[in-house]
Image (tube, rainbow, N blue to C red):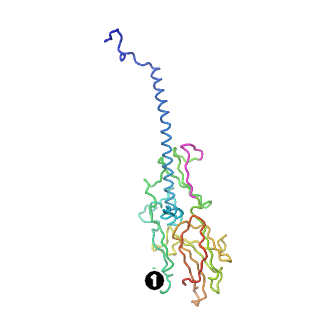
Amino acid sequence: MTRDGFGNKPAWDMAGFSLMELLVVMVVILFCVTIASGPLQDRTGQARVEQTMAAMAEIKDAILGRPLKGEPALRDVGYLPDMGSLPDLIDGQPKGLWTADTDNDGSDDLLRRCLFMDEGHVPEGLGIDDSPLYIRMGWRGPYISVPRDGVLRDGWGNQLVFATDEPETGDLTIISPGANGIVSENDAGPDGDIKLILSKSQLMVPVSGVIIPSGIYDDSNLADVGVRIYYAAPKPDEPHANITDLVYLELAAQAVNTVITENGYFLFQDVPVGPGRLLEISQPVPKDTPSNKTAFARTYIHFEVMPTLNFLGRIDIRNSYGFY
């Protein structure tokens, strides 16, 4: 064995570490790794939360419509503005946000955007394009990128849960189960659920106005006036888009807060937010007609429903188109 000038073994030839020394080294290494991994885990967890919040915000915009530049109160190109309702949950997912073929049978289940009108209500002497009774509505998605395997997910890759509690509140709740992938009210920290609630007040709002009493025909009164608001129907009865295929809200004497008052005031409580809404005001008119028909005068107003109280102002219906 080679020795140095003093007869000692070289350092590399010394006896190996003892078991205790190895254990001490391992403990020190594990301690350092633990200390270093804490901030890394925190940063990773925060990134997952941010990804989840961004995904939820994108879904919210897909449903409510994206705010118009410079007009944050106005929204356009969203499922609710176009369809007048929330998307149906199919297998727990709002498939209508990315496809009109929600049952995967190769044909549309949602009406694509088109012109609604009723050719029978075109006034005499006017062309179809001049009819006051028309409106464009319908599906014009996809409103969100088509998700992998048809499931919207959070930042951890867990399936987002959509919950509605109609008719109690009309809210839509979007839930991320957090890091552990389990929806639970008792979880906390990184395992805690993340929720985004679209309240009914964001989806459905009041619309009101006043019919000028002087616009009522001499032989009629406000009690004879009918008021409707039309908006899109997800599944029309016929492929040809007709105004009769639209969903409508109608004032009814038995409904609370929806009758026309003596001074002409009317109020609709729950109208879906968005453009492409049509107000129809009709009243019988004194006119010689066949015994089996009633003559009506109708007024149509196109308007946008804002996410607040909507007052359409004072409406004069004296100069209306006449229809049977």
Disc 1 secondary structure class: loop
- Residue at the (60%, 76%) spot, across then down: 227
Q: Residue 276 versus residue 96: which sits nearer the camera?
A: 276
Q: Does the magenta stretch include residue 197?
A: yes
Residue farthest toward the bottom in the current orientation of the protein:
288
Residue 20 lies, in percent from the top left, at 47, 20
Please determine whether, in this image, residue 116 is positioned above or below residue 9: below
Residue 5, horizontal then vertical, whole percent:
32, 9
Quadrant in which the C terminus is drawn: bottom right
Q: What residue type is labelled 1?
A: Gly
Tell me the magenta residue range: 185-198
Quadrant, the N terminus = top left
Q: Is residue 130 above or below residue 21?
A: below
Q: Mark 1 points at which residue?
A: 127
- The single residue placed furthest to the left in the displayed view is 2
- Residue at 57% x, 64% y: name it: 307
* Left or right, 231 with reference to 265: left
